[in-house]
Image (tube, grey):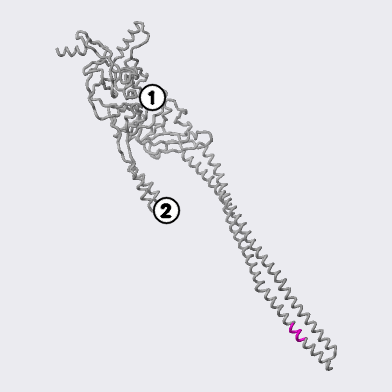
Amino acid sequence: MAGAGAAYKFFGNPFKAPRADLVYHSVNYEALQLTIVERGQLESADNRDVICKVKAGNKGSTVATTIKWVIDDGSPVKQGQLIVELDDSGLQEQLKSQRIARDKASSDFIKAEEDYKILLSQNNSDIEVAKTDLEIAKLNLEKYLDGDYPQALKLVLGNIKNAESDRDMQQDRSAWAERMVKKGYMTASQAQAELSRLESYDITLKKAQEELRVLNNFTKKLMETDFRSKLEEKKRALERVQLQAKAKEVQAEALRKSTKSVYQQEQSHFDEIEEEIRKCRIYAPQDGMVVYFVPENTRYGSGSRQTTIAQGEPVVEGQKLIRIPDLKHMLVNTKVHEAMVSKVKGEDWKLTGFGDSIRTVLTATPDALTNLLAGFAFTEIREQYRDKEQQQIFGGQKARIRVDAFPERILQGHVKSVATVAGQMDWISADVKTYQTMVAIDEPVERLKPQMSAEVTIIIEDQLEKVLAVPLQAIFGSVEMGGQRKCFVMNTDGQAEERDIEVGLSNDKMAEIKTGLQEGDQVVLNPRVLLNEKNKNKKANGDKTAAGTEATGKSDGRRGPGGKRPGGGPPGGGPDGGDFRGNSPRRDANGRPDFPAKN
């Protein structure tokens, strides 16, 4: 009787068999673990991007060069192996022209350098000649004032003394001659001759005195003025020579610097072209596998410029050509819906100040040279102890990863990072905002390759709680209903009746039922069958407006592999609104599953 009562409770009248086209589920208390299930692609945690560093040659054009040869996609490579060769024919022609310009600039610089040295020597010679002329002018003045003039003065004064002596002696002789004439010892003519000789001595004395007057009043002033003027002129000549030498030196120095600058510019341009030619040969930065880079915005044809990595294709400066991943450390690049991103937490790090402490110790000395050497030493030390500059506070939420290529194996991982801004929306779901989330795989796994599809289950809370739960397939409703939803429950008459329920938290399979159901109730897992019948009955009764609700709501028409919703839902998308990538149910602002069905 007890068994019959239970059957009657679950299926209604025991004499009335349950419908074979309906699938039932008994409502029970279950341990509901909150998770987010998303789909993504595998990437390496340590990717080395190969970037085109060749500069665009023509102004207004972004194209730098074309691909001359590229290694096949998926090829294993070793560090230092040639993987891309870009066309450098145009750069080679530029190099030839630039070599001519550089050599000419070098010749001009060498000539200017030698001319500068010659000019310095000539300036020194001119200045020394001017200094010598000045010194000679000084000596001439000193020679006249201290030599020629005193000597001439002494000579004139000597002549005056001699003339005075001769005159005095002749005066005595004239007087004696007059006395002798009076005594009759001499004739008058003899006395007259002596008097004439006295007059001659007077004239000689006056001439000597006149020479002294001319020497002191005219000759000395004239010669001194002449020598002083020559001395001043030599001083001015020395200043002119020095100024001219300075001007010539400045002009020659400017010419030397300008030709040197031109030469350095031409040499720098020559070196840049050589460097651009070297950039045309790109080598593998690390061991790994070649993966042609495809930008996210061009994968669905939404980019402004479609990039193709192939021989003969143009490339631009800064374009990522190849990504070489480290296959030993992999992660999953997935996207989390904005309604759930606040519940996802990645790794949290804080700065330890280790690098600043090392820098302070190394640069504590006031010596500039020591500080310079310490700067280079700090760079080396920082690379060795970079892991000590940050300390992990939180290791990220745990996650489980199932790779489509190895579905039988569940990999353990954790959330590494969550983007702070929403990613670029694609045209398929322009109204859906998602945030890029990186989930690292904790254990090294062989045979994993980039771009492999994977399903990630992020564990939001580790604590499990016994709640009344039903599968998501049994629930239907619209986002306008808030937390209220509907489901079909078997009544005591064995008929499925529509019942209002209130849902709480949920994961990718089960949803918490707060009100509307009891433990042991039987819910219909495929309510679409009943809703379709309801719509048909209304149409048959003349109601052209499909007032009924669909069991699964409006699936966006996108399907996962095999046309099934990831997680075991019915084909064509499930009632949770999962999309073709296997993402979690779309949720409303309160984090509840959004089951967009007509009500």
Tags 2 and 1 touching, CB below 8 Å: no
Q: Going by the image, does 9 lie left or right of 179?
A: left
x, y percent for residue 127: 61, 61
Q: Which stretch is magenta?
A: 164-170
- Tell me the kind of residue under disc 1: Val
Residue at 31% over, 15% down: 551
Q: Residue at x 36, y 44 (%)?
A: 383
Gap between marks 2 and 1, in whole Å? 58 Å
N-term-proximal mark, 2 vs 1:
2
In the rendered view, does 549 fall on the left or right side of 147? left
Main SS of the magenta segment?
helix
Bin the neighbour count of mark 2 within 10 Å (Cα to Cα): few under 14, some 14-19, many 20 and up: few
**Residue on which the image places disc 2:** 369
- Residue 384 belongs to magenta span: no
Please name whichever residue, 161 or 389, is drawn nearer the observer in this view of the structure.
161
Q: How many marks?
A: 2
Mark yes or no: residue 180 visible: yes
* Quadrant housing residue 114: bottom right
Residue 292: image location, x then y, percent: 41, 31
Q: Secondary structure at mark 1?
A: loop
In the image, residue 171 above or below residue 591? below
Compared to residue 406, the image places residue 14 above or below, namely above
Check disc 2 and report its element: helix, strand or loop.
helix
Q: Which residue is mark 1?
A: 432
Which part of the image, by quadrant, shows the N terminus?
Answer: top left
Residue 402 visible in image: no
Place of residue 136 in the rendered image (x, y in percent of width and height, measured from the top left)? 64, 67
